[in-house]
Structure formats: structure tokens, C-alpha cells
Amino acid sequence: QVQLLQSGAELKKPGASVRVSCTASGYTFTSSGISWVRQAPGQGLEWMGWISGDTGETKYAQNFQGRVAMTTDTSTSTAYMELRSLRSDDTAMYYCGRDYETFDYWGQGTLVTVSS
Amino acid sequence: QAVLTQPSSLSASPGASASLTCTLRSGINVGTYRIYWYQQKPGSPPQYLLRYKSDSDNHQGSGVPSRFSGSKDASANAGILLISGLQSEDEADYYCMIWHSSAWVFGGGTKLTVL
């Protein structure tokens, strides 16, 4: 069965960077992409960007351009999302989702807290 | 004005039907978009429900009951998620999504209360 397993919760100070991982299993990693979606406490869903599991091509949402970097390691079927220059309003749950035309499988989420 | 607008909340009784709307911003024609619907329960990631563009272009998520269905109201420029035979377990947040201007865009979500 398809599973996406994300790394654990993070506590970061303003201005720092965070890297979240998403390890896929149960399907061929290179056959689809991974999207990252975040959700601030009590708020809705916000798409951050997408990376191809095959070519590593990326597409970032305008709100995150210049501050986010998505990469993959096909040898371990893992996708990474790095967000830089963290602010308090980056405090959120970060999800990865298999992007196979739609987000049909999701990781369990990684809570990133930004606080001094 | 947001690309996708959803009512913030909706209440309905068990056994009844609920119609959740997702209105596209003026100038964005609902007829040209596939609209995706997700359900999210507290403490869990979203779950894909279905995709609807037309009666000939639609997709039901794996294991999603047929009482969840999609449609459109062209006159209102809106996508609709219809849930029939409401059950207590349907109480959740529901989000619509489209691919617009080379980005995935979510609506703000509707909190459905079944009481």
C-alpha cells in the first residue's frame, strides 16, 4: 500500500531554516510528483509547490518563491522541502502529498513551530 | 477577491443531503476546470474524495462512497459537492481545489456539522 512517511516535529527560531522529509513506499517514486501543502493552526490549506519524482523539476507557489527549495533522493524515494528565513507565521503543519493528477495519498504531517 | 470561495460553515441533519459550494472568482469560468474535493477530519491529513469537470470527466476516490458526488452550477459559476444520506462521520472540513495559473489553489474550506 502507498505510504508517505514524514519526519518529526521541528522547533525553530525566527530566521532559521527547516528541512522536512517525506519518504514514499508502495509505489514507483519516479512515476509521479510530490506536492507540499501547509496548514496554519485553525486555517485552510495552502499549496507550496511541486517536484517531479522523475526529473526533479520544480514548480513553486508565488508566495514561497525564493524562500523554498524542494529536492528528491530517488535512491531512497525521499522528497525534501526546505523553507528558509522562517517567521512566526510559518508555524504550521506541513504535508507532503503524492501528486498523481490529484493528491491521492498524504503524509501524516510535520508540525513546524517558529518561536523565539 | 479569492480565486475560490467556500462558505465557512454548513449544518445539516443526519440522513439529509448537504450541498457544499465552491464559487470561482468572476472571470474564471467553472466550465473549464476540474474541481477536486477533499475531506479533512481533526488531527488528520486531508483525504481525496473526488474530481468533477463534467458527467463524462469525473473520478471518484478509491473507497469513497457513492453518496459523495460532484456537479457544477454554471449560473452560479460554482462547483458543488453533494453528500447524500448524511452520517455523523461526515462531520469534517471540506476543501475544493483547482489548477489555476500553473498552481494548485484551495478554497478556504467549509466546516460541515451534522446534527
Image (cartoon, coloured by chain):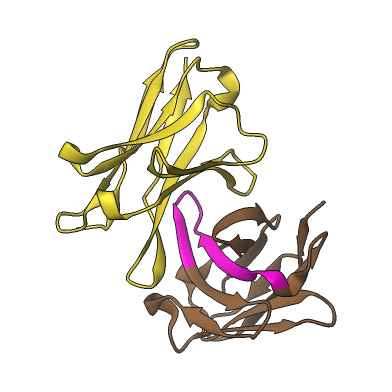
Chain colours: A brown, B yellow
Residue shown at 84% from the left, 78% from the top: A76
Would you say residue A35 sits in the magenta stretch?
A: yes
Residue farthest toward the bottom in the current orientation of the protein = A66
Which residues are the magenta region? A31-47
Q: Vertically, is B62 above or below A21?
A: above
Q: Vertically, is B55 above or below B31?
A: above
Residue shown at 39% from the left, 22% from the top: B18
Q: Position of residue A20 (x, y in %)?
A: 69, 74
Q: Name the residue nearer the viewer: A86 or A59.
A: A59
Q: Name the residue nearer the viewer: B39 or B76.
A: B76
Would you say residue A24 sits in the magenta stretch?
A: no
Residue farthest toward the front in the current orientation of the protein = B56
Q: Is residue A95 visible?
A: no
Residue shown at 36% from the left, 51% from the top: B107
Q: On the picture, is A14 further left or further right than B12? A: right
Q: Vertically, is A98 above or below A31?
A: above
Q: Position of residue A3 (x, y in %)?
A: 78, 56
Q: Position of residue B64 (x, y in %)?
A: 61, 33
Residue shown at 46% from the left, 39% from the top: B94
